[in-house]
Image (spheres, rainbow, N blue to C red):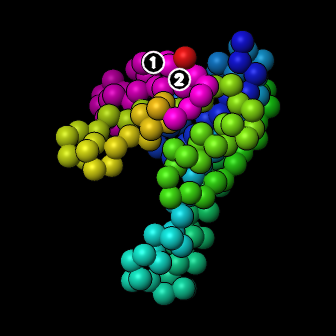
Amino acid sequence: MFQHILMPTDGSEHSEQAIKRGIELAKLCNAKVTGIHVVPDYHMMLANEGAFDAGTQERIQEEAQQNAARFLEFVKTSAAAANVPCDTVVATNARPYDAIVNTANERGCDLIVMTARYRKKLVKLIMGDEATRVLHRASIPVLTFRGIMSSNHPDRDKAVPRATAKA
């Protein structure tokens, strides 16, 4: 079935739930996984703003790299616990969806497993949804897990994210 699954993470609880399910699928398929976190291209963003000095830019970049390492450690630990081969990637791009699709292509992945967050009204219009952008650009199947319940919902721990797939 699937041999190499790419799993983007943003470090959120929704993302961690999708990773857990993706690793379960990888174990069933005897597939390997690659976790990816995309760090925004702060140099480009901050250069356009012109509001920060070089020291501030370096501090922001360093913090982003530390977060990436922490987010990807969850992927490594979860995969190791399930005896699933795992690799990780930190990509830098102003458009995370491009980095995700490019990495899937470069690494020969045959499935992308990620979370799709529900956003409301104006936030959705302004920020969009990375999962939707990946769905529209990827040439391989994308399995999305929707994190519908809020983090403080009383039934949150009992729920299993619903999955949708695009082939």
- The reply, left or right, for residue 8 in relation to residue 110 is left
Q: Is residue 164 magenta?
A: yes
- The reply, left or right, for residue 107 in relation to residue 142 is right
User: Which residue range is magenta in the image?
Assistant: 137-166
Residue depicted at 75% across the width and 32% down the height = 108
- The reply, left or right, for residue 13 in relation to residue 8 is left
Which three-letter amino acid code belongs to the residue tagged 2?
Leu
Q: Which sits in the foreground, 112 or 161?
A: 112
Q: Are marks 2 and 1 in contact (CB under 8 Å)?
A: yes
- Percent across and percent down for residue 86 are 76, 36
Q: Which sits in the foreground, 13 or 43?
A: 43
Q: Is residue 112 magenta?
A: no
Q: Which sits in the foreground, 117 or 129?
A: 129
- The reply, left or right, for residue 77 in relation to residue 154 is right
Q: Which residue is mark 2?
A: 143
- Percent across and percent down for residue 94 are 50, 58
- Dot 2 or dot 1, earlier in sequence: 2
Tell me the quarter of the image containing the N terminus: top right
- Look at the numbered disc 1 and give the secondary structure of its residue: strand
Q: Which residue is mark 1?
A: 164
